[in-house]
Amino acid sequence: MDDQPLETPPAAVADSDNPVSPADIIRSEMEKRGWSQSDLAYVLGVNSSAVNPILSGKRGISPDMAKALASAFDLPAERFARAQAEWELRHARDPDPTVTARARVQAKYPLREMMRRGWIKEGATSAELEAQLCRFFNVASIADVPHLAHSAKRTEYSHIPPSQLAWLFRVRQIAREMPTPPYSQTRLTAAVERMKEILANPEDIRHVPRLLNEAGVRFVIVEGLPGSKIDGVCFWLNGSSPVIGMSLRFDRIDNFWFVLRHECAHVLHGHGQISAIVDAELEQLTLDLSEEERTANGEAAEFCVPQEKIRSFYLRKKPLFAERDVLAFSKIARVHPGLVIGQLQKIAGRYDLLRRHLVMVRSHIAGSALIDGWGDVVPVDR
């Protein structure tokens, strides 16, 4: 039966859009030479049982067989290897649509980290993933998620990097569910004055969430996403619901009070009502700042340590700042030494100065604030 003449096959010319099977190419070359299956097996030095599965399409052409066929037919081995690869690719199963969906999101947002944090559920189908993202970003369609749209359509969030934007929307998601009275500028001003009275004791930071809540400010702490370098945010859910979000990127008393007062300044001046104000790398001394940022920076610095007094102290003591002098000045200013040291480090560019006084504060506020991150997830209605 193996020696019966072969039926004339169709032209075995492959292209990327319509690849022919490797078996068709082999049959075409056998026909040109008048070879039977057993003839080919003889030339290759194998049994007919080794050739039959290839000609019937039940077995693919291995690299070794591709080279053997190339020698037998005096053709490039790549022709057989390429035909086999194209044929297998043509008949391979289509991938799960979730692969495309995950890749599209991961290309812009830290999706795996968002899933690890519990912001997005793992194991979702493509449709479920898109639905979750729409709920997270509060949009009607996946095409409306900032940075994911195929078009060049700009939104109010176009200038915010994706990792910072994902963090912002997590703050927004939590803030929406907080029961808070209407905002009062008068009460927030009073709250800021009350905060000035507790700057000396790190443990009193636990009172901050209550003071802000009573003023109608929603206060949320969300651990920053890797590489986002975000410190805080100010935005408004509506005309009577301002939100302050903080990341505690630096768990230090000086950074906590500076960032908090910076965001309070934005709220007191009505900043962030049109579009969210995202503050990143506030420790950087940058000259190219908006008027809003200069105002917030100035008020935050003055709140932490009266600026005229700290400049006078700096000029009197530079270049040596004895610990006893710093501690004495802190008592006079009625603030924690860490706040004085934080200001001196910026002025002098001496970030090694008395660092042991830059105490951590997250543990002091953990029991009174809504904190999302560091192993904890704030439950929200998703």
Image (spheres, rainbow, N blue to C red):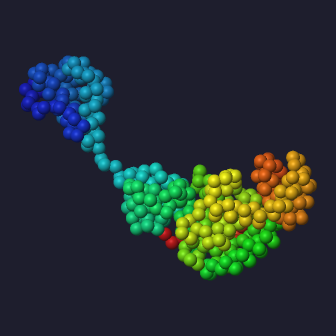
Name the spot of residue 25 as percent of width and height, x first.
18, 29
Residue 173, above or below 179: above
Quadrant location, the N terminus: top left
Q: Is residue 365 left or right of residue 58?
A: right
Q: x%, y% of residue 324? A: 92, 55
User: Residue drawn at (78%, 56%), measured in percent from left and top?
Assistant: 343
Depth order, front residue of 239/135:
239
View extreme (bottom): residue:
181
Q: Nearer the viewer, residue 348 or 330?
A: 348
Residue drawn at 56 percent across, 77 percent down: 239
Taking the spot 28% from the left edge, 39% from the top edge, the residue there is 88
Count of picture labels: 0
Side of 109 where 251 appears, left or right: right
Residue 309: percent from the left, percent from the top?
A: 85, 61
* Residue 125 visible in image: no
Question: Considering only vertical position in the picture, is 131 above or below 32?
Answer: below
Picture layout, residue 234 above or below residue 92: below
**In x, y percent, where is residue 155?**
46, 62
186 horizontally vs 54: left or right: right
- Is residue 309 or residue 248 the one in the foreground? 309
**Residue at 64% over, 57% down:** 289
**Quadrant of residue 205 in the image?**
bottom right
Name above or below for residue 294 compared with residue 52. below
Residue 187 visible, this angle: yes
